Image: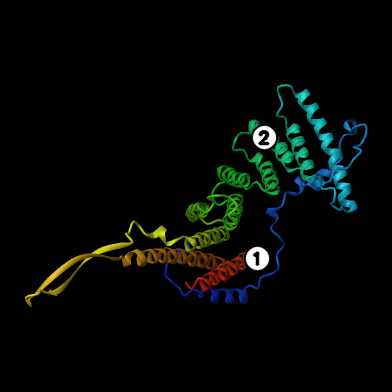
Amino acid sequence: MVSRIKSSHSTAILAVLFALAQALFPAPVFSADPSTELEADLSTAERANDPLPQEILPESEPSQTESPGQDSAKQLTPEEQETIEQAVLKREQYKQIIDRLELEAGTDVYSAELIETYRDLGFAFYTLEQYEEAVAAFDKALQSVRISNGINSVQQLPVLQEILISNESLGDWEAVDTNSHLIFHINRKNFPVGDERRIQALNELGKWTLRAVSDDQIDGIQSSAGELVDLYKNEIRQTEKLGNYDGKNFHLASLYLGEARAKMSVTKEIIERPLTDYMMGQPQSTTTTRCYLVRLPNGRATQVCETVEVPNLDYYIDPSQRQYQEISRNLNDIRGAISDAYEIVQTEEAYTEKQNSLLLEIQQLTESYNTFVTENAL
C-alpha cells in the first residue's frame, strides 16, 4: 500500500519525476479510448446494414428520402444518402415488427426479441438524427429489460449507454448527468471493488462531471466536483484494503489520478469564489475609544474620550487567509495523489502499454498543475 504524501513540495518539483519517467519509459502514441464508443455489435452502421426478414418489407419504398434533422440544404455523399435511405426503410420495418410482436406476445410483451427490436428502432432514429424518437425507443427497451431482469441488472447497461449518447446529441445535459450516475451505480452494485468495469465506470463518470463543471452545463453542478472527490477517496480506501491481485497497482494509480483531477476542479472553484464566502460573520468595521487632552479656559488640561468607528482589519485579512489555506490544502492533496500514482506505476517491472498510458496521464496532469500554480501565483 502506498502512503499518501502530505508534506509540501515546491510547485514544480514533480516535473523532475516526469523528466525521469520520460527517459525511462518513452511514451508511445495511443489510439482513442474504445470505451467512449458504442460496442461494435451495437453500432448504428452495422444495425443499418443488417438484413431483415423479407416477409415484412413494405410494399413500396418511401417516395421521399428524409435528411438528418430535416435539413434539405445539407449536401450528402452517396454513401451518406444510402445510409439514410436504409435507415428510413428499416425504421418502418422495425415499427411493423414491433406491432406484430406485441400482438403475438399478448401478456408477454417483454420478450428479448421485442427488446432488441426497440433498440434497432432506436438506432434507425439515431441515424436519421431524430434523437428524441431514438431516446423514446431506447427507453422502451430499457423498461422492458428492467421488468425482465431487475432494476439493477447489468443487462440494461448497453441500453443506458445508448440513451446517454442520444441525450448528448440532444444537448439534454440533465439527462446525461442522470444516466452517467445511474451507469456508475449499476456497475458498483454488480461488480466488486477492484473490478476493472467498476473502476472504468467511475472514471467515465469523473470525465463527464468535470466536463460539465468546466463548461457550466448544469445549474449548481459545481458541487459535484467535491462529491466526485469523495467517490474516489472511498474507492481508493476500499481498493487499498484488498490483498494483492494482478493489476491492483494500475487500478490504484488510475484512481489517484482521478482524485487529483477532481481536486484540481475543486481548487479552481475555490479561487473563483468571492472572499465574502470566507468572512465567517466578521463585521466590516469595529469601534474603539480614543482619548486626548483638552486645555480648559483656566489653563488646566483634562482628558476627553470618545468612541469612534474604524475599519476591522480582520474583515479584510482573515477571509483571504482562510481562502489561501483551503487552496494550499487542496494543492498539497493533488501533489500527493500524483506522487502516489507515479510511485506505484514506476515499481511495475513489466513494460506495458497500460504503464505507458498512466505515465503519460501523470505527465499531462503534472503540467496542468504547474501551469495552474504559475498562472495563479500560488
Give the camera-side residue of 270 and 308.
Answer: 308
**In the picture shown, does residue 53 fall above or below 186?**
above
Q: Is residue 126 left or right of residue 302?
A: right
Give the camera-side residue of 67 and 259.
Answer: 67
| Label 1: few (<14), some (14–19) or many (≥20) C-alpha neighbours in 10 Å | few
Colour convention of the picture:
rainbow
What is the x, y in percent for residue 34? 70, 55
What is the x, y in percent for residue 176? 63, 47
**Labelled disc at residue 145:** 2
Residue at position x 78%, y 27% in the image? 101
Q: Which residue is mark 1?
A: 352
**Labelled disc at residue 316:** none
Q: Is residue 127 left or right of residue 247?
A: right
**In the picture shown, does residue 108 fall above or below 72?**
above
Give the camera-side residue of 268 and 370.
Answer: 268
Residue 305 picture quarter: bottom left
Q: Is residue 103 left or right of residue 26?
A: right
The amino acid sitting under disc 2 is: Val
The amino acid sitting under disc 1 is: Thr
The reply to whether the C-beta atoms of the residues labelled 2 and 1 are less than 8 Å apart is no
Structural distance between the alpha carbons of marks 2 and 1: 39 Å
Residue at position x 70%, y 40% in the image? 135
